[in-house]
Image (cartoon, rainbow, N blue to C red):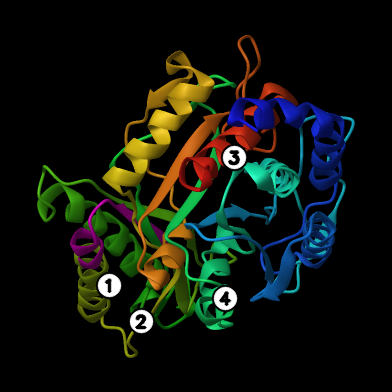
Amino acid sequence: MTLEKILASLDEIKDWQEETYKHLHAHPELSMQESETVKFIEETLTSYGYDTQVIGGGVVGVLVNGAGPKVLFRADIDGLPVKEETGLAYASQVEMTDKDGQTVPVMHACGHDTHITAGLGAAWALAQHKDSWSGTYIALFQPGEEIAAGAKSMLADGLVDRIPKPDVALAQHVLTTPEAGKVGSKVGPFLSSAASLKVVVKGQGAHGSMPNLSIDPIVIGSAIVSKLQSIVAREVDPFKFAVVTVGSFQAGLKANIIPDKATLLLNIRAYDEEVKEQLLAAIRRIVLAECQAGGCLEEPEISVFDNYPLTTNDAQVRARVASAFEDYLGQENVVTYDPMTASEDFSYIAQAFDIPYLYWGFGGFVAGQDVYPNHSPKFAPAIQPTLETGTKAALIAAYSYLGK
């Protein structure tokens, strides 16, 4: 059977995919708490004939079909602590307890419900048409992408030793551009590396009328915020990309009380790991220096979390898959992206296996539709042709290696 016929056979599961998508959208789960989602995926893959394992909070299905390449396709599965405002009939009403013990609303505000549904669709098609391809297909559904924990969790639970070593790794993401029905990728750095930091400045509290008895962490924290702005402007090569953002500054509760500490939350982005390390080192230097200048009696606490690697696409893999996209989706539906400042932990998996990889995007919004960005409470991709495109793209990319 030709790939054209396999793609056409996806009509058989169109209704199932749409209902599955609505179900997943209505029942999101927080990062590293995706138990019901994992159960559903595992049962579905098993029904298709895959050998399945739950690994590090995610699930992997392996379908061995003779000799040939081994292809890993990854889909992320977690939702976000966002209260949905789409007005959809299948909008999420879910609330969960987060890692801090707080009850929060949960929404698939990044489109991972689309990724799951497309990934299952591609897995179904390959299982149904084993006579048309040869090799091993590895369907990996990863938890915790939104907190950069899922890939590491699966690797820590022995992923590398528990599944066949792939020859190539593939992944995709629904995005606001290009228009639904189209896909896009690029060679080299596509998504930036990133990290978040928590900085706790330890001062000395006092009555607001007696500032001379204090070590004011608000003043010190303000100096830190101001000085941080000089890193990109005065330390990073102007021809290299870098971002330093202070997203939160929390200190004190009353106007007449000088608090004893201030907490800052920072985020950094870079397309170069050396630049990323430069940013981290500069932040530490500035925080320590300003605390010393302010007379702090204790050193500040500086911790790094949500650490994402650079996503940089292999040129040969991109050429092969992009050519297949053009053949089966049409040249007019394949675009080249500019680098994006979002981040992903998918490449940790490819790095652990020491294999090349490709990460691409596909559009989720049709002409005339209100477009809201990923992570917005109003993020609501059009069901079609988004699901169809994501499923076909996953299948075409895998088939470009597995097809006879």
Around disc 4, counting alpha carbons within 10 Å, would you say few (fewer than 14), some (14 to 19), or many (20 or more)?
Answer: some
Given the image, on which type of amino acid does mark 3 rest? Leu
The residue wearing badge 4 is 153
Disc 1, disc 2: CB below 8 Å?
Answer: yes
Q: Is residue 210 left or right of residue 297?
A: right
Vertical placement of residue 147 versus 295, above or below: above
- How many angstroms separate mark 3 from mark 1 (CA)? 49 Å
Q: Secondary structure at mark 2?
A: loop
Splitting the image into 4 quarters, where does residue 194 fall? Answer: bottom left
**Earlier sequence position, callout 3 versus callout 1:** 1
**Earlier sequence position, callout 4 versus callout 1:** 4
The residue wearing badge 1 is 287
- How many angstroms separate mark 2 from mark 3 (CA)? 50 Å
Residue 49 in percent (x, y) is at 78, 59
Which span of residues is magenta-colored?
266-277
Q: Secondary structure at mark 1?
A: helix
Q: Secondary structure at mark 4?
A: helix
Q: In which quadrant is the N terminus drawn?
A: top right
The residue wearing badge 3 is 395
User: Does residue 70 show up magenta in the picture?
Assistant: no
**Earlier sequence position, callout 2 versus callout 3:** 2
Mark whose residue sits in front, 2 or 3: 3
The residue wearing badge 2 is 300
Q: Secondary structure at mark 3?
A: helix
Vertical placement of residue 40 versus 17, above or below: below
- How many angstroms separate mark 3 from mark 4 (CA)? 26 Å
Residue 295 in percent (x, y) is at 26, 82
Mark whose residue sits in front, 4 or 1: 4
